[in-house]
Image (tube, helix red, strand yellow):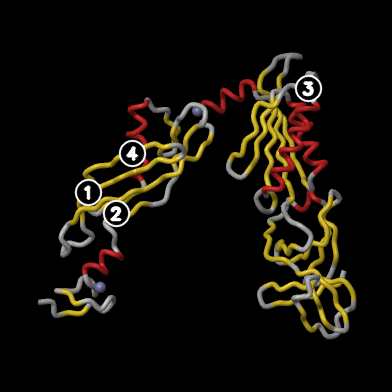
């Protein structure tokens, strides 16, 4: 008859294992543990990225590689009897069963788990080299300080549509591909000057900064062939955002092509930071100010729902900012 009470769940039990009943122990020490992972696959040739290498498998080998990927990411206290691997669309479904126990005092039990790994697409090194053969220009667009927003991507896409129309019938080359790779949008072209044109246009339309470089890919004498790369940093902060740079917090008053107009919250000093300088320093968005007005010593936001006493504050349009336990009022 059970005589001991589990101190964790209160159920009667025969004995305690490390101070708890079997059920509680199993809950805390699972027989199977799977680290979250994705299957990285080349979108052109189907190669899989396994243990730091791209491997292009045959149809039969693919299953074995996917199985190895799972074994690298799982820990089993016992044995695996079967592992089913099913590839369906953009995911790989694993069904694993076996027998095991996390503790010698607990009788081994059968387990069966299912795990769905998302397939993420990239381009393997071989395919990259093949594209490189015809690619002569690349525009890589990133967000700064945060990732590109949907609205930025929509604007860039509209711009590309316009450019595609603009270059019809001209010998400017063509756009090979436009794709999201990781956090950046990459546009590949057959001609360096087309890539340069695209980088320029994006820079004209969106607050941004860009760096460019040329690399000689082949050529002797006057037959030199260059590959051009531009990296465009699209500014992803807006008026009213609060950012931290170094040890200072700034409230952004305006974002434009001429730079970022901001006020240092502690010193109250206003400054215009050119965009090429803005992207040079580590920057973090830490909050947002509330826009409103100071009247008779009270700050009221534009919707009228925030009212704060600000004795002595200057009258007029203002931002109210809270960062941690510090409060600021910036009249504008
Ligand atoms: Zn228990
Ligand atoms: Zn490939």
Comes first in the chain, label 3 or label 2 = 2
Q: Which residue is mark 4?
A: 85
Which secondary structure lies at badge 4? Answer: strand
Comes first in the chain, label 4 or label 3 = 4
Comes first in the chain, label 3 or label 1 = 1
Image location of residue 322, percent across then percent down? 71, 73
In the picture, the disc for residue 98 is 1
Q: Which residue is mark 3?
A: 168
Distance (Cα) linking label 2 and label 4: 17 Å
- The residue drawn where x is 79% and y is 75% is 304
Asked if the residue under mark 4 is in contact with the one under mark 1, i.e. CB atoms within 8 Å, the reply is: no
Distance (Cα) linking label 4 and label 3: 47 Å
Distance (Cα) linking label 1 and label 4: 15 Å
Which secondary structure lies at badge 1? Answer: strand
- The residue drawn where x is 27% and y is 52% is 76
Horizontal arrangement in the rendering, residue 73 relative to residue 134 (left or right):
left
Q: Which residue is mark 2?
A: 32
Label 4 crowding class (10 Å Cα cut-off): few <14, some 14-19, many 20+? some
Which secondary structure lies at badge 3? Answer: loop
Is the shortest distance between ligand 1 and the CB of mark 2 under 8 Å? no
Of residue 159 and residue 16, the one placed in the foreground of this image is 159
Q: Quadrant of the C terminus?
A: bottom right
Image location of residue 313, percent across then percent down? 85, 80
Asked if the residue under mark 1 is in contact with the one under mark 2, i.e. CB atoms within 8 Å, the reply is: yes
């Amino acid at each position: 008859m059970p005589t001991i009470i589990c101190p964790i769940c209160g159920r009667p039990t025969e004995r305690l294992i490390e101070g708890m009943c079997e059920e509680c122990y199993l809950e805390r020490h699972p027989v199977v543990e799977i680290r979250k992972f994705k299957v990285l696959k080349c979108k052109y040739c189907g190669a899989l990225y396994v243990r730091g290498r791209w491997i292009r498998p045959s149809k039969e080998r693919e299953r074995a590689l996917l199985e190895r990927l799972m074994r690298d990411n799982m820990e089993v206290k016992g044995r695996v009897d079967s592992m089913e691997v099913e590839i369906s669309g953009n995911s790989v479904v694993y069904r694993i069963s076996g027998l095991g126990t996390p503790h010698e005092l607990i009788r081994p039990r059968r387990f069966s788990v299912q795990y769905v790994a998302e397939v993420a697409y990239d381009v393997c090194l071989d395919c990259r080299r093949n594209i490189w053969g015809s690619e002569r220009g690349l525009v890589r667009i990133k967000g700064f300080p945060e990732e590109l927003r949907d609205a930025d991507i929509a604007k860039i896409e509209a711009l590309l549509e316009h450019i595609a129309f603009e270059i019809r019938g001209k010998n400017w080359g063509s756009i090979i591909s436009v794709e999201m790779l990781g956090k950046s949008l990459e546009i590949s072209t057959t001609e360096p000057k087309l890539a340069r044109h695209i980088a320029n246009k994006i820079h004209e339309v969106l607050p941004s900064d860009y760096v460019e470089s040329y690399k000689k890919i082949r050529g002797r004498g006057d037959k030199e062939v260059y590959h051009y790369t531009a990296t465009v940093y699209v500014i992803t902060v807006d008026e009213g955002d609060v950012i931290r740079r170094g040890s200072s917090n700034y409230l952004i008053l305006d974002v434009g092509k001429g730079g970022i107009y901001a006020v240092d919250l502690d010193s109250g000093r206003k400054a215009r930071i050119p965009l090429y300088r803005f992207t040079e320093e580590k920057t973090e968005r830490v909050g947002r100010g509330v826009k409103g007005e100071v009247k008779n010593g009270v700050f009221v936001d534009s919707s009228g729902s925030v009212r704060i006493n600000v004795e002595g504050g200057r009258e007029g349009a203002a931002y109210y900012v809270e960062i941690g336990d510090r409060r600021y009022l910036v009249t504008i």
